[in-house]
Image (tube, rainbow, N blue to C red):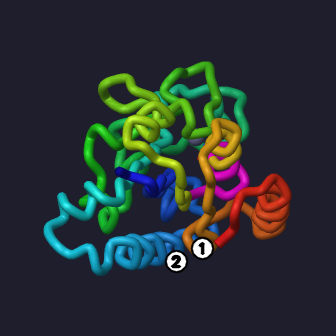
Amino acid sequence: MHNSALVVVDMLYDFIDGSLACLNAENAVKATLAAIDSKTKGQGGEEHEILDTFPILFIRDHHPADHSSFKDQGGIWPSHCVAGTRGSEIHQSLAPYASEELTFDKGCDRDTEQYSGFEAVNNAGQPLAEVLELLDTTDVYVCGIATEYCVRNTCEDLQKAGFKVHLLKDCIAYVDLQGHQKALAEMAAKGISIE
Ligand code: VGL
Ligand code: ZN
């Protein structure tokens, strides 16, 4: 049984120290590592045993170089998370926890903005939600970047699909502090648990 799982959203270099560096990102990465330790503590054993009892799923913003969300294509964001560049990689402290089948990419289609990780797919083409169901997940813990965009859209889609969503508030980073606080309040009002 895998009642609980952790979804790590876009903890990628461009959102941490790159072209779209977000506020609180370094702290959020450290707090995420601490949260992984605390969830797995006492379960002992090798890393593969830890991942068997508490699956950790990673979402990656993963854009082509000419993605329509980029300013030079008429979009609102600087170029970021271009597939194959350092900016699109998971932070090195978390990368050891990421397996191919539990890593899900989004924003891969040039013409589509995709903030939510809900329909992101792994290298076998399976969407996040399908894999969470295969893992018998009821409760999804969410952390990552950015609160107002990908984190929020992912949490809301997971909740709509019937998962109990727990947002780890020390483990998120944001574009703007006020936007972050507003998003937290609105998510809480929808029944997402802010912990
Ligand atoms: C995101 C801006 C642009 C996010 C993705 O994942 O929150 N934000 N692309
Ligand atoms: Zn993006």
Q: Magenta part of the protein: which range?
A: 144-154
Q: Based on the picture, tell me whether residue 148 belongs to the magenta stretch.
A: yes
- Which quarter of the picture shows residue 174? bottom right
State the image coordinates of residue 43 (x, y, percent, origin top left).
26, 73
Kindly identify which residue carries mark 2. Answer: 27
Q: Which residue is mark 1?
A: 24
Q: Position of residue 110 (x, y in %)?
A: 55, 21
Up the image or down, 184 lies above or below 130; here it is below
Give above or below for 19 relative to 127: below
Q: Say which of 163 and 20 sits in front.
A: 163
- The secondary structure type at the circle numbered 1 is loop
Residue type indicated by callout 1:
Asn
Instruction: State the residue at coordinates (42%, 50%).
Output: 87
Residue ranking furthest to the front: 1
Q: Nearer the viewer, residue 182 or 109?
A: 182
Q: Which amino acid lies under the numbered mark 2 shown in the image of this protein?
A: Asn
User: Under tag 2, what secondary structure?
Assistant: helix
Tell me, yes or no, whether the two marked residues, 2 and 1, touch with CB atoms within 8 Å: yes
Q: Vertically, is 52 above or below 121?
A: below
Task: Estimate the x, y position of residue 164 in percent, counting from the top left.
Answer: 62, 52
Please name whichever residue, 37 or 86, is drawn nearer the observer in this view of the structure: 37
Q: Residue at x 72, y 57 (%)?
A: 192
Query: Residue 100's quadrant in the figure?
Result: top left
Q: Is residue 131 left or right of residue 98?
A: right
Specify the quadrant that holds the C terminus. bottom right
Q: Position of residue 71 (x, y in %)?
A: 67, 36
